[in-house]
Image (cartoon, grey):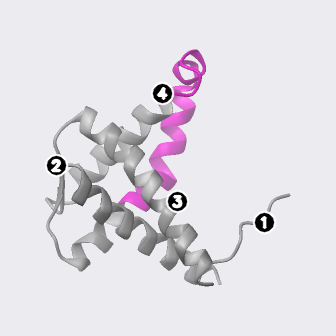
Amino acid sequence: MALRNFLLRVLINAIALAITAAILPGITTSGDIGALVVVALIFGVVNAIVKPIAILLTLPFTIITFGLFIFVINGLMLLLTSSLSGGRLEVAGLGTAILGGIVMGLAAMVVEAVLRGLGLTEEKKRD
């Protein structure tokens, strides 16, 4: 079950990345599905390892800005993914990356809702 959830998360990120690249002119991908999956894997690893550390280190800024600094952190994670992707993902700059992070988040929510509606994902359990 964990492997299935992981693969679905990679698929959702890949689709969200494709949507983001189609919408924003400053974000481009190499175009093929394999590259999107590789970038989605890199993005997942960056978000799992680097993002929690970045959030912890920038907590005072996040508190002062009432949480808006999280958008900057998301943009930086997208820029880091771009630099680690070996040219599979190109991001024009920090402003584009911040907008890209917002669009990716929204696109991922929509894709996840569609997959949930099709019965391919489970409802998240709330405690």
- Which residue is label 2 attached to? 25
**CB atoms of marks 2 and 4 within 8 Å:** no
> Distance of mark 1 from mark 4, alpha carbons?
28 Å
| Residue mark closest to the camera, 1 vs 2 | 2
* Residue 69 image label: 4
Q: Nearer the viewer, residue 32 or 23?
A: 23
- Which residue is label 1 attached to? 125
Label 3 element class: helix
Question: Is residue 33 visible in the rendered structure shown here?
Answer: yes
| Residue mark closest to the camera, 4 vs 3 | 3
Numbered range of the magenta stretch: 43-69
Residue 66 drawn in magenta: yes
- Quadrant (top left/top right/bottom left/bottom right) for the C terminus: bottom right
Label 1 element class: loop
- Give the amino acid at mark 2: Pro
Question: Is residue 41 visible in the rendered structure shown here?
Answer: no
Q: Residues within 10 Å of mark 4 (few under 14, many from 20)?
A: some
Left-right relation of 47 to 2 = left
**Which numbered disc flags the more N-terminal residue, 1 or 3?**
3
> Distance of mark 2 from mark 4, alpha carbons?
23 Å
What residue sits 17% from the left and 46% below the top?
A: 26
- Give the amino acid at mark 4: Phe
* Residue 109 image label: 3
* Residue 108 image label: none
